[in-house]
Image (cartoon, rainbow, N blue to C red):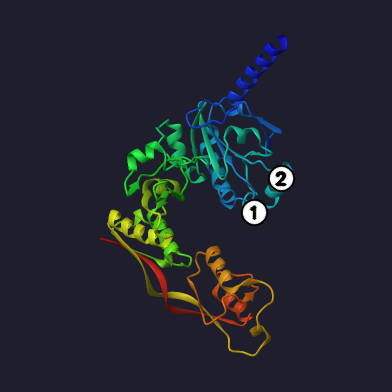
Amino acid sequence: MIKGILCFYLMIVVAMVNGQEKALKVGDLYEYKELVKVLNAEKAEIDLKKYEDRLLILDFFTTSCGSCIAAMPKNNKLQKHFDSRIQILPVTVEKRERVKNFFSKNETVKDNKLPVGYADVALKETFPYQGVPHVVWIYKGIVKAITNADMLEAQYIDEMLAEKDVNSWPQKNDFYSFDPSSDESMKQYFVSSAIMPYINGAKLSYSSDTLSSGLIRDSWVNVPVVTAYVYAFSIINELPLMKKERIVLEVSDRSYFEKPDSVVQSIWEQLNSIGYESILPSYLSEVERMTRIVADLNNKLGLNARLENLEAQVWLVEKVKSTSKVDAGQKTGQPLALKMGLLEVMYPTIPPIVLKDVDEMRLLTIKGSDDFETLKQQLSENGLKLSKAVRPIQKLIITEL
């Protein structure tokens, strides 16, 4: 009997402890109880209570996250500007030696003055995430916001310190699950198709599910309009990389379709992304459904989006007429079409690359470059010719009706 009572008591204690250790969300009270192992600080550990009198910004990162590392010089400047009113604390789950070695050798972070948390377990359990960068804003003991890193700018720090309402900020929630079959969604949007508003906290996503009544529902969440069309057309037709040279906007307000430099990505997506839901018969193929969806989007948005072949400046890759050994092709390397596609992804400044009368599966080994003459020389060594030309390429045209 006594053992049973003790076991019951222990279960209650464990439940209470686990309840206190639950993951926190925006609006929750934060107790500043974690001890964080740090580099670049006077002590080996920081008690976060040290920062309860200021705006604490936890910047979760990894050394392999390029955007995380690129932002650190900017974050150092922000820390210097706001001084003791804020504390930006980069935190990673990675081990001490890896972090120490990275910060000692990487040119981007060599002048870092911020303390850097490492081997973190507790903070990730308190503020769980799946992807970095992941930024948590804590002020006066309250979790005020959880955002992407592009919100870490002076204007938003000013808003937080002025205690303005930040509930409208774009939030980041890696565990948000949008269920289009939920009662709330179906009551509000149960029609054959609907444009839906941006959902704060949700990720950009596309899903299809079969309904029991012989219908298929396609649901898109938080998708910019151009991206929505590109997605649909990529299912109808095989598309190349749809970089800016392949998008033609015949509209009065371009800021609705492409992000201006003056606006951070998260804010722009919040203002201009849409959700979309379509319920169509299941006997239609995916291509047929997407064809109807494009027509429906055009009708609902007052647009005419279509694919056309139009002339543009390109880099043209052709085969060199020669009897040299390179004509036989390489036995190792990457297929030509794949390598050229990767170059366009890696170097946004490269214009569209067009292949003419060449074996797209031909293997070649090149380092790649966005410099025309360098790439021309590398391709020449592989029996290929690179030239600048004007050629018709597939473009997405969006015209305002």
- Coordinates of residue 102 in the picture (x, y in percent): 69, 49
Mark 2 secondary-structure assignment: helix
- Which one is nearer the viewer's eye here, 112 or 273? 273
Q: Which mark is residue 100?
A: 2
Q: Quick check: 186 above or below 387?
A: above
Q: Quick check: 367 above or below 390?
A: above
In the picture, residue 50 is in which quadrant? top right
Q: Residues within 10 Å of mark 1 (few under 14, many from 20)?
A: few
Mark 1 secondary-structure assignment: loop
In the picture, residue 92 is in which quadrant? top right
Which residue, as the protein is rendered here, is positioned at the far front? 213
Return the residue at label 1. 107
Q: Is residue 305 visible?
A: yes
On the rendered image, what quadrant is the C terminus found in?
bottom left
Q: Quick check: 311 above or below 247?
A: below
- Coordinates of residue 46 in the picture (x, y in percent): 66, 31
- Amino acid at dot 1: Glu
Q: Quick check: 93 above or below 333?
A: above
Instruction: Give the residue displayed 37% in from the left and 62% down from the top.
Output: 291
The answer to whether 331 appears left or right of 254 in the picture is right
- Which one is nearer the viewer's eye here, 236 or 35? 236
- Amino acid at dot 2: Lys
C-beta proximity under 8 Å, tags 1 and 2: no
Q: CA distance from mark 1 to mark 2?
A: 13 Å
- Coordinates of residue 60 in the picture (x, y in percent): 59, 41
- Coordinates of residue 398 in the picture (x, y in percent): 33, 63
- Which one is nearer the viewer's eye here, 143 or 337? 337
